[in-house]
Image: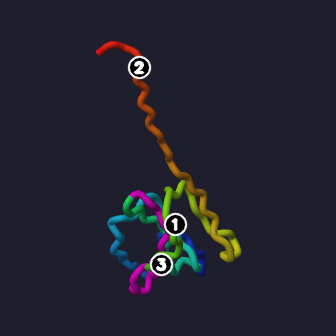
Amino acid sequence: MAGSAELGAGPRDVRYVDPDPRISGRAIFIDNGSTLLYAITEKGVANLWTQPLNGRPGHQITNFALGQIASYDVTPDAKSLFVARYQVASDIVLLRDTTAQQ
């Protein structure tokens, strides 16, 4: 088919991106495919970052102080960001029988 945009047909603009080794989870394309959005977990806290595909460095776009990111996505109109987060909390309680002879 002339003029078709079939996958695997015709020349492509191939770009290699050196991924940040701290990426946790998936990376998605945003901004009409010109940017990657991904999560990075540092010191037990996850935040979202963007990486332009034009060679500029990535930068952090959220500033959460606690918790992990379960899922994230951008609305079809690219005006809103969805982020589902969670935090794991645990408490330890030590019970001891103080009436027992030792």
Residue 34: x and y in percent read 51, 81
Quadrant of the rendered image containing residue 32:
bottom right
Residue 36: x and y in percent read 49, 73
Badge number at residue 10: 3
Q: Nearer the viewer, residue 60 or 21?
A: 60
| Residue under the point 41% across and 30% down | 94
**Identity, as a three-letter code, of the amino acid under mark 3:** Gly
Q: Are marks 2 and 1 in contact (CB under 8 Å)?
A: no
Inspect the magenta stretch and tell me whether residue 63 lies in it: no
Relative height, residue 5 to residue 39 (above, below): below
Q: Quadrant of the N terminus?
A: bottom right
Q: Residue furthest top?
A: 101
Horizontally, residue 44 falls left or right of residue 73, namely: left
| Residue under the point 49% across and 65% down | 65
Q: Which is nearer the N-term, disc 1 or disc 3?
A: 3
For mark 1, what is the residue?
A: 64
Q: Nearer the viewer, residue 101 or 2?
A: 101
Q: Quadrant of the C terminus?
A: top left
* Element carrying mark 2: loop
Q: Are marks 1 and 3 in contact (CB under 8 Å)?
A: no
* Element carrying mark 1: loop
Residues in magenta? 44-58
Gap between marks 2 and 1, in whole Å?
42 Å
Q: Residues within 10 Å of mark 2 (few under 14, many from 20)?
A: few
| Residue under the point 47% across and 42% down | 90
Q: Nearer the viewer, residue 89 or 4?
A: 89
Horizontally, residue 33 falls left or right of residue 98, namely: right
- For discs 2 and 3, the disc positioned in front in the rendered view: 2
Q: Residues within 10 Å of mark 1 (few under 14, many from 20)?
A: few
**Identity, as a three-letter code, of the amino acid under mark 1:** Phe
Badge number at residue 97: 2
